[in-house]
Image: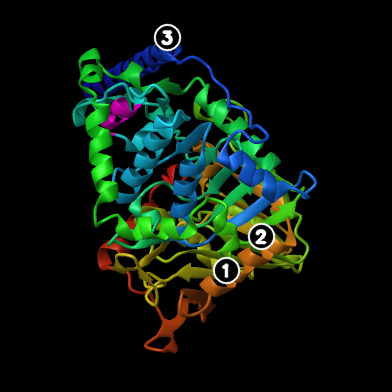
């Protein structure tokens, strides 16, 4: 009886402390919000990008220009060159921006643009920024750069304090901004699945991500800018200077940061990237180097609203835009999702499509290839019902890129693309995973389009990535789950998770038993 009383008291005290933490955070956020601002409108010929993009758009009749960025190095070059070509504004929003080689090189381009008078607004989700406040504060001291954090922790130092705040604000702090967008001069935007970091741009010794972005021209750029403005001015967004103590703000040194990044950019480590940039010369030259532009009036950047992070409105707002495209397919659906947890409802929907005569295929990570083994535990229970219902299921191999050599040597692969096509004409490229976290917790965004040429490019990539030398095809035989794939130059069959370590199998199995799938 005493134990029950103690436990009840502990629950009440924790609930009260949690309420006070959330209430205090809300009061602070209302006081600390920065001045609202909007995207700067494009002009006819004010900047290099104005002139270059206007030339590309001439004769397009107001349509959107869409160009697929399949290669990681091209994705880095597009961002760096867009920054170099900007003359008016850079609006950048990311879930992750690592302070590694490529992250520092792009920060160098950001500062260089600001030094030319370009207005830079940098919006980062706070969950991955711990320990980097001096960097962000230094950037924020530039007269043309402002840095804001989405749903930030008030505990900026100390793992214990931050951990305590996360426990007390558990229901709100798990809601993150997963969006990715790079907008230059209101003329060119890049959206897709890539964050900023070496593993997204073939600069990491560890396995690199296979990912997908799309360059946008035309009205879709304004869509992207509107999404950025909504988050920049949202209730969950706080200027980084409001989060730091005055003493830390005084210690922020932009000149030291500028010098350090300049030395890195001039050094030997960065030379492979800079050599590639010099080959392209301008941001528009890449379109003459094998990257096709597809023009269509049927393209829109869609996004969850920032209020989703406050648990307001429709939890799965973006899914309400995407699912009708999938459920309305008449011949085929091809889904690529690194973290794929369809759940009972999603599994039923995909199997129903197959029952209606529609070819449905899904590509996700194998247990050996995924960077989050726990998510695989949420996905694994749905393989058998999907396969039994006729869905074609593929899992990327960890050695899928073994025939390719990056700038920093050979490396493995992990899938990070979030995309789908329907009927070979409609499709989506963005940040949305087919899992509960993307549907109900994180804010997501991406490009929803109709264009046979772009969809054809995506389908060709899907066909390549699902070949036996890059992925395993799963099947059920005599009740056993089997993986077919190329092994030692011949197609063979594995009777358990191929190439996965015992520890990974254990993590995935345990997570599969736990009631935590809504958080995956």
In the rendered structure, the answer to whether residue 87 lies left or right of residue 397 reads: right
Total residue callouts: 3
Q: Secondary structure at mark 3?
A: helix
Q: Locate the N terminus and report the quarter of the image it occupies.
A: top left
Front disc: 2 or 1: 1
Q: Residues within 10 Å of mark 2 (few under 14, many from 20)?
A: many
Task: Tell me the residue at 52%/32% (across/down).
Answer: 89
The residue at 55%/46% (across/down) is 191
* Residue topped by disc 2: 421
State the residue in front, 393 or 33.
33
Query: Height in image: 260 above or below 405?
Result: above
Task: Determine the CA span between mark 3 and mark 1.
Answer: 48 Å
Which is the main secondary structure of the residues drawn in magenta?
helix
Instruction: Reply yes or no: does residue 8 show up in magenta.
Output: no
Between the C-alphas of marks 3 and 2, the distance is: 44 Å
**Where are the magenta residues, as a range?**
130-139
Q: Which mark is residue 513?
A: none
* Residue 118 x %, y %: 47, 30
User: Which residue, given by chain and number where applicable, does mark 1 sit on?
Assistant: 461
Residue shown at the point (54%, 38%) measured from the top left: 184
Quick one: 233 or 504, which is closer to the camera? Answer: 233
Question: Dot 1, how many residues are within 10 Å of its Cα: few (below 14), some (14-19), or many (20+)?
Answer: few
Q: Nearer the viewer, residue 82 or 354?
A: 82
Compare marks 3 and 2 and give the one earlier in the sequence: 3
Q: Is residue 138 magenta?
A: yes
Residue 187 coordinates in the image, percent (x, y): 61, 39
Measured as percent of width and height from the top left, residue 79 is found at 47, 47
Looking at the picture, how far across and down is residue 234, in whole percent? 52, 22
The mark found on residue 31 in the picture is: 3
Q: CA distance from mark 2 to mark 1?
A: 11 Å
């Amino acid at each position: 009886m005493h134990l029950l009383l103690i436990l009840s008291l502990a629950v009440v005290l924790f609930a009260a402390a949690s309420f006070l933490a959330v209430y205090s955070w809300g009061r602070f956020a209302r006081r600390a919000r920065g001045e609202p601002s909007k995207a700067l409108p494009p002009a006819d010929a004010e900047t290099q990008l104005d002139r270059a993009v206007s030339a590309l758009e001439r004769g397009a009749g107001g349509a959107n220009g869409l160009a697929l960025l399949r290669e990681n190095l091209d994705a880095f070059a597009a961002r760096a060159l867009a920054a170099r070509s900007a003359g008016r504004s850079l609006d950048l929003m990311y879930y992750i921006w690592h302070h590694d080689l490529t992250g520092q090189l792009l920060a160098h381009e950001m500062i260089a643009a600001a030094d030319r008078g370009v207005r830079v607004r940098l919006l980062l989700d706070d969950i991955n920024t711990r320990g980097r406040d001096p960097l962000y504060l230094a950037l924020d001291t530039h007269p043309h750069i402002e840095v804001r954090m989405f749903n930030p922790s008030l505990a900026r130092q100390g793992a214990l304090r931050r951990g305590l705040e996360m426990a007390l604000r558990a229901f709100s702090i798990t809601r993150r901004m997963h969006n990715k967008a790079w907008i230059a001069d209101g003329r060119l935007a890049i959206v897709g699945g890539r964050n900023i970091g070496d593993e997204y741009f073939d600069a990491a010794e560890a396995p690199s991500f296979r990912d997908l972005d799309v360059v946008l021209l035309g009205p879709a750029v304004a869509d992207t800018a509107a999404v950025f403005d909504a988050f920049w001015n949202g209730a969950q967004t706080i200027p980084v200077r409001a989060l730091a103590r005055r003493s830390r703000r005084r210690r922020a040194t932009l000149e030291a940061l500028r010098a350090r990044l300049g030395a890195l950019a001039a050094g030997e480590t960065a030379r492979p990237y800079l050599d590639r940039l010099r080959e392209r010369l301008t941001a528009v030259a890449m379109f003459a180097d094998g990257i096709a532009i597809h023009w269509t009036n049927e393209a829109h950047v869609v996004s969850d609203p920032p209020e989703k992070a406050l648990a307001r409105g429709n939890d799965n707002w973006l899914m309400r835009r995407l699912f009708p495209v999938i459920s309305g397919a008449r011949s085929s659906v091809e889904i690529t999702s690194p973290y794929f947890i369809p759940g009972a409802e999603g599994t039923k929907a995909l199997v129903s499509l197959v029952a209606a005569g529609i070819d449905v295929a899904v590509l996700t990570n194998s247990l050996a290839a995924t960077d989050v083994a726990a998510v695989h535990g949420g996905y694994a229970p749905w393989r058998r019902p999907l396969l039994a219902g006729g869905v074609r299921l593929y899992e990327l191999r960890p050695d899928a890129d073994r025939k390719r050599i990056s700038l920093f040597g050979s490396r493995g692969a992990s899938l990070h693309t979030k995309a789908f096509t329907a009927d070979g004409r409609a499709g989506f490229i963005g940040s949305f995973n087919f899992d509960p976290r993307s549907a109900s917790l994180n804010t997501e965004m991406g490009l929803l389009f109709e264009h046979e040429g772009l969809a054809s490019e995506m389908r060709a990539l899907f066909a390549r990535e699902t070949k036996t030398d890059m992925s395993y095809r799963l099947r059920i035989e005599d009740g056993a789950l089997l993986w077919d794939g190329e092994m030692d130059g011949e197609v063979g069959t594995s009777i358990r998770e191929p190439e996965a370590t015992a520890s990974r199998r254990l993590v995935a199995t345990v997570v599969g038993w736990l009631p935590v799938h809504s958080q995956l």
